[in-house]
Amino acid sequence: MWLWIRRGNDPAPTSLAKRTLIALGQPGTVRRFGGLSLGESSYLIDTISQTATPPQTLRFIIPDPSGFYTFPVWVDHTDSKKSIRWRFRISDSISPTEA
């Protein structure tokens, strides 16, 4: 999986993009417990690496109400009924220059 973090209007003193770079460069500074996952423990992450060059071809997950895959877009850890899940499909392969 290739992940981009877009700079936005994050009101936090240190943006998510900056905190992510710090965590990747200095993982010992991150205080957390449990496994790192994409929203749910069934989507555990094995490895994180930072690279500037994307692979030769890319595929995207695209919101699609009739898509096959369901992913959480907001997880409420106090009341799972309030968590929000969307359906997605996977795009056809494209080159990074088309993205």
Image (tube, rainbow, N blue to C red):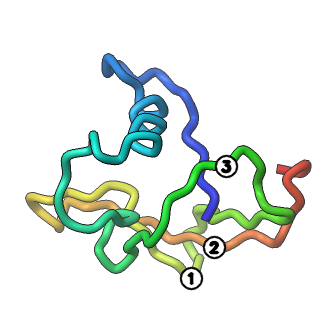
Task: Point out the frontmost of discs 3 and 2.
Answer: 3
Q: Which residue is mark 1?
A: 68
Disc nearer the start of the sequence (2/1): 1
Residues at discs 3 and 2 in contact (Cβ within 8 Å): no
Query: How many labels sit on residues?
Result: 3
In the figure, 13 relative to 30: above or below?
above
Q: Residue 84: give x, y in percent of width and height.
A: 32, 61
Q: Residue 19: give x, y in percent of width and height.
A: 39, 33
Disc nearer the start of the sequence (1/3): 3
Disc nearer the start of the sequence (3/2): 3
In the figure, 66 relative to 31: above or below?
below
Q: How much space separates mark 1 and mark 3, taking CA atoms?
A: 29 Å
Q: Which mark is residue 36?
A: none
Residues at discs 1 and 3 in contact (Cβ within 8 Å): no
The amino acid beneath tag 3 is Thr
Q: Residue 88: give x, y in percent of width and height.
A: 57, 70
User: Residue at 89% of width from left, 59% of height from top?
Assistant: 95
Q: Which residue is mark 2?
A: 89
- Quick one: quadrant of the N terminus? bottom right
Residues at discs 2 and 1 in contact (Cβ within 8 Å): yes
Q: Please indicate whether residue 21 sits to the left or right of residue 53 in the image.
A: left
- Label 2 secondary element: strand
The amino acid beneath tag 1 is Phe
Q: Which residue is mark 3?
A: 51
User: Residue at 63% of width from left, 58% of height from top?
Assistant: 2
The amino acid beneath tag 2 is Arg
- Between residue 57 and residue 75, name the one nearer to us: 57
